Image (cartoon, helix red, strand yellow):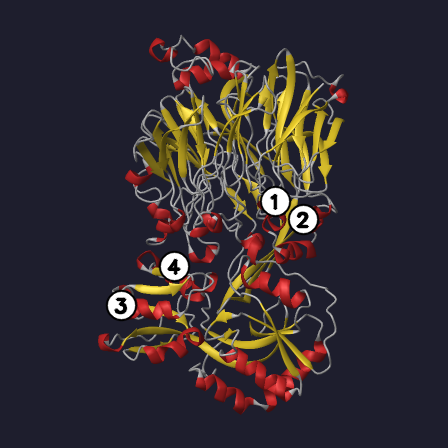
Amino acid sequence: MRRAVLVLGVGVAVLAARHAEANEFRVCADPDYMPFSNRAGAGFENAIAELTAKALDAHLSYTWASNRGPGGFSEYLSRNLDAGKCDAVMNLPFGNQEELTTDPYYLSSYVFVSRKADGYDLDNMDSPILRKVKIGFEHDTPPEDALKLRDLISHAQAFSVGDSEGVSPASMLEAVGARRVDVLITWEPAIGWFLRDYPDLRVTRVPNSRASGAPEQYLFSMAMAVRKGDEALKQRLDRVIAEHKAAIDAILGRFDVRLYPAAGDSL
Amino acid sequence: MNLSAKLVRSVVGLTAGLAMTVLLIAPPGLANEQLEKTSGDPNQWVMPGGNYSLTRNSKLAQINASNAKDLHVAWTMSTGALRGHEGQPLVIGDMMYFESAYPNYVYAVNLGDIGHMVWKFEPPRNPNAPPVACCDVVNRGVSYSDGKIIASALDGHIYALDAKDGKVLWSAINADPLKGQTVTAAPMVVKDKVIVGVSGGEYGVLGYLSAFDIKTGKLVWRAYSAGPDHGMLFDPEKTIDANSQKAVGKDSSLTTWHGDQWKLGGGTTWGWYSYDPKLDLIYYGTGNPGSWNPTQRPGDNKWSMSLIARHPDTGMAVWAFQMTPHDGWDYDGVNENVLFDATVEGQPRPALAHFDRNGYGYVLDRANGKLLAVHKFDPTVNWATAIDPVNGRPTVDPAMMTKAGVNVKHICPAAQGDKDEQPSSYDAGTGLFYIPTNHICMDYQAFDVKYKGGFPYVGAILNMYPASPEVRGRFIAFDPMSGATKWAIEDRFQDWSGALTTAGGVVFYGTLDGWFRAVDMSNGKVLYQMHCPSGIIGNPITYMHDGKQYVAVLTGVGGWAAIGLAQGLTKASEGLGAVGLTAALGDYTNLGGALMVFSN
């Protein structure tokens, strides 16, 4: 896969960042990607950033850049966080090697989205109903691998919301509502907030699995991230996350980001 | 024996009916026979590879090892395009034709009036195409036949242009970018057909080779690289499994895939095509199977990573030889197949040589695909401990197999291979192949947690780095029968340009950082070099005009070798730079397509 070179590769970015003012919390964020963030500050990552700035007793300042431009999220990190235009991003999976992640501040999951009226029995990726329905999935995410593994991919519909600027995750729900897709498998935080406009749809979690041999992971913990080496800021952010857990959970709740407990799951 | 000379003798004559129509531009004739004949005329360069055998060898000798030091730039011109130029000009009579990287400008330049663009063709731009071009928006050149210039555009359109004025005579659609399909290859004209393949193995494309009628652009046949026999144009009883030398049998592809996975089977066909008029067979290779993660596609995944021979009239496969079953490294099998006469047990044998991404040079009997010789052409190859000399099957070092949940260090070669599409050249006089190669290894780290805007996922990390300190490319003189490397030039970056050998004893190639070189074929001594406006991933050609020999090459860095530079991706170049692959390239060269023409 030649594409590997574009998205893969660990770089230890050693870029001298402009030292932030002591009372400034400088965040890079997407100006147009709800429910995560937008320029008006209406997304849940905006709200978490505001809470964090307040807890740090700092002024929040943004550098706006698309998460979904050429080169994808890695390029976004390189051109913004690594380039010193900001000191933190609010969105990177915990344990990612490209930057230094904080402790996770929420844990969510990939989910099945289906029409309530259909009453599909959806427990896991091996649920028999998946062999009979039209499945939608986000390109290059864990459900794609799972569908390939089970020979379901050739009947499935790929979406590329995460690569397409200006495309709302709500477009995937619309496809389910309009019966172009029967079961959508997607990252819950991307669509939770839009579900209030689709009362006829329901959400079921996809459990992690080892049913087919290789581990299949659908549960991810999300963290903030700072530049590699910026231990000082990481520790300050870790403290905020630990001390304001209830407030963070409340914000996520307002945006219908469903928090899934890790109990019983093997990450 | 020079093959193109042999081909000329097999031509019996021209077809009178067509003779009148194209006199102004070039000698007339039926596509196949005329091309065979003119490819033997060293004054012209009528096919991408110089001839159907893809030897990229010229009988011109005015520039020789004694006077090559006096080479200089005769003239240059911009191609108007910034990105990777992996093609070469054609010279037909007094005209030169070439195509740029996307947006795929095609130029006709009058050699008698330097700088005069007689016409320029610009295909309509399709904004859906560049985003699904995995490895830069490259193009590998035009073909000529019967008064027509055949050009492929990135978005999958194939254009037949009137060589006189650039008017579109017909266009055909060979790929759909909305399905991840693009075209970067140079078409080949055989008989009355235009043969061309497809790119997009990274986007779930099932590869195929197409044949279009040269007069009308109508699709005549299409042969898929995987799936049911009828789609692949395989005859279960007659098509030979070249590895076993037995009939392939029923469902030779389907039985090597789990379920329906062949539908995303990959096996794209974006390399070079060759043709043997005597056997009436075309030869090409297929790319990587459809999913990076080999754990998810058990089986040999046929006929990905294979060399295939087909009849041009029907597309029916005569034989298929798989080099890398169950690929775990992205060693696409698309590199050129150069037709030459091998000497086996003292007897000449019609053979083809193929220097694969996987680091092995294969020599096959071109009638039945039987393996005649196989040797490493880079000493660092370690993914396989051996290749069976009879059936060609690799013994994979299990420690070097990439798989889910396992980190693997120091796999050689890296995914770019010890050689990618950059075409080699063969000289029958020395019996050696002159091969531009890569010299790189990689680490594969499984299961890193990654993020695409809005969506977490698990993926693998690939780090590529030079196989020897500061050496990422080697230009070698190589004997594929013995595996001996006669000499090697070590270069800082991957050698990603093509090679051109000449009867003057001089071989030409270019470097990724922009040096164009004339090298003594006997000893590898650099006789002349010139730093060009941009790095070179194009392929040198030579021709004669007004009694003087010229050498021409397209410069214009890009392609996979220079993907960070081409796409302005700081993370990609930083990521690779952390392991030292091509981060420094931008310190030596810059983007920008230009034609360079040299003479004494």
Which mark is in front, 1 or 3? 3
**Is the residue marked by circle 1 packed among few (<14), some (14-19), or many (20+) residues within 10 Å?**
many
Identify the residue at horizontal 49%, vertical 79% (top origin). A42
Q: Spatial distance from mark 2 to mark 1, Cα to Cα? A: 8 Å
| Chain hosting mark 1 | B
Q: Quadrant of residue B155?
A: top left
Q: Amino acid at mark 4?
A: Lys
Q: Quadrant of residue A176?
A: bottom left
Q: Is residue A141 left or right of residue B583?
A: left
Identify the residue at horizontal 41%, vertical 28% (top origin). B167
Q: Are marks 4 and 1 in contact (CB under 8 Å)?
A: no
**What residue did someone put label 1 on?**
B561
Disc 4, SS:
helix
Q: Spatial distance from mark 1 to mark 3, Cα to Cα? A: 44 Å
| Chain hosting mark 4 | A
Toward the viewer: B276 or B43?
A: B43
**What residue did someone put label 4 on?**
A148
Which mark is in front, 2 or 3? 3
**Is the residue marked by circle 2 packed among few (<14), some (14-19), or many (20+) residues within 10 Å?**
many
**Is the residue marked by circle 4 packed among few (<14), some (14-19), or many (20+) residues within 10 Å?**
many
Disc assigned to residue B582:
2
Which mark is in front, 4 or 1? 1
Q: Are marks 2 and 4 on the same chain?
A: no
Residue A103, image x, y percentages = 60, 80
Q: Amino acid at mark 2?
A: Thr
Q: Are marks 1 and 3 on the same chain?
A: no
Q: Is residue A172 left or right of residue B328?
A: left
**What residue did someone put label 3 on?**
A178
Identify the residue at horizontal 52%, vertical 36% (top origin). B335
Furthest residue in direction left, as rendered:
A117
